[in-house]
Image (cartoon, grey):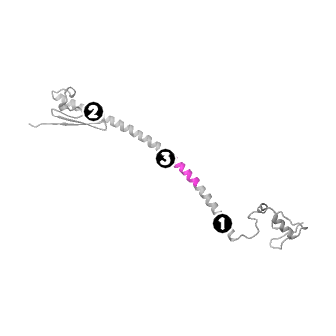
Amino acid sequence: MLPFRVSGQGTDGSRTYFQGQRPDPNLSLEKQNADLRSRPHDENMEVGYEHNLLPPTLEGLEKKFHDDIMKLAKERNDAEDAENSRHREKINAINGQYQEQLTALRARHANRRDEFLRKESLVRQQQYQQAMMDYYPHSNMAPADSLPTERGLDILGLLEIRGLNLEVHTRGGVPMTTVHVITEFS
C-alpha cells in the first residue's frame, strides 16, 4: 500500500508527475526518463491544461485570457446577429402588412374619387340642362339641340345664344360648365 501524502510534504518516489505511470523499481532512473521521452506526444496531452503541475507563465496566462475574450466576443456577436435577424424578419413582416394596407387604402380612395367625379359630372350636366330649360320657356326659342351652332363652334366650345353665354370646358375628361347671362341695357 502506498503511503498517504499530504500536500506540501516531501515527494513520494513511487509516483511521477504523469498520471497512470509508476516507475519500475528494476529500471534505473535514466531509463525511466528515456522511456517517458519515447512515449507518443498524444499520451502526454491526455493530462490536459488544468492538470499541468508547472506554474503557468505570464505569456501562457495572457494567451489563455486572449482566447477566452475572443471566444466570448464571438458568442456575443453570434447572439447579436441572431437577434438582428429576428428583428429584421419582424420589420419585414410589419412592412409587408403596411404595404398591403396601403394598397387597399389607395384602391378605396381611387374608387371614392371616381365615384365623386362621376356624381359631380352628373350634377353639372343636370345643372346645365336645367339652366337651358329655364331659359327657353321665357323666350320663344327652341332648345339648343335644334339650333345650329353659331360661328362653327360646337357644344364643347363657346356658344352664344341671345343673351346666354355658355362655356363648356373639360378638365381630365370632366365637363366644367360656366353659364353667363348677358343683359343689355337700353
Q: Residue at x 36, y 36 (%)?
A: 114
Q: Can residue 105 be seen in this snapshot?
A: yes
- For label 1, the crowd category at 10 Å Cα-Cα, with few meaning under 14, some 14 to 19 and many 20 or more, is few
The answer to which quarter of the image holds residue 172 is top left
Question: Helix, strand, or loop for circle 1?
Answer: helix
Q: Which amino acid does the dot numbered 1 rest on?
A: Phe
Say which of 37 and 184 sits in front.
Answer: 37
Q: Which residue is mark 1?
A: 65
Q: Amino acid at mark 3?
A: Asn
**Highlighted range, magenta:** 81-93
153 falls in the magenta region: no
- In this figure, which residue is indicated by the disc labeled 2? 125
**Circle 3 — which element?**
helix
Among numbered discs 1 and 3, the one appearing first in the sequence: 1
Q: Earlier in the sequence, mark 1 or mark 2?
A: 1
Left/right placement of residue 167 relative to residue 7 reads: left
Q: Residue at x 84, y 64 (%)?
A: 21
- Residue in the foreground of this view, choosing between 154 and 136: 154
**Dot in front, 1 or 3:** 1
Q: Quadrant of the C terminus?
A: top left
Where residue 70 sits in the image (x, y, percent)?
63, 62
**Pointer 3 local density, CA inside 10 Å: few below 14, some 14–19, many at least 20:** few
Q: Is residue 153 left or right of residue 65?
A: left
The quarter of the displayed image where residue 119 is located: top left
Q: Which residue is mark 3?
A: 95
Query: Which of label 3 and label 2 is nearer to you?
Result: 3
Question: Total of numbered circles in the picture?
Answer: 3
Left/right placement of residue 11 relative to residue 181 reads right
Q: Which mark is residue 48?
A: none
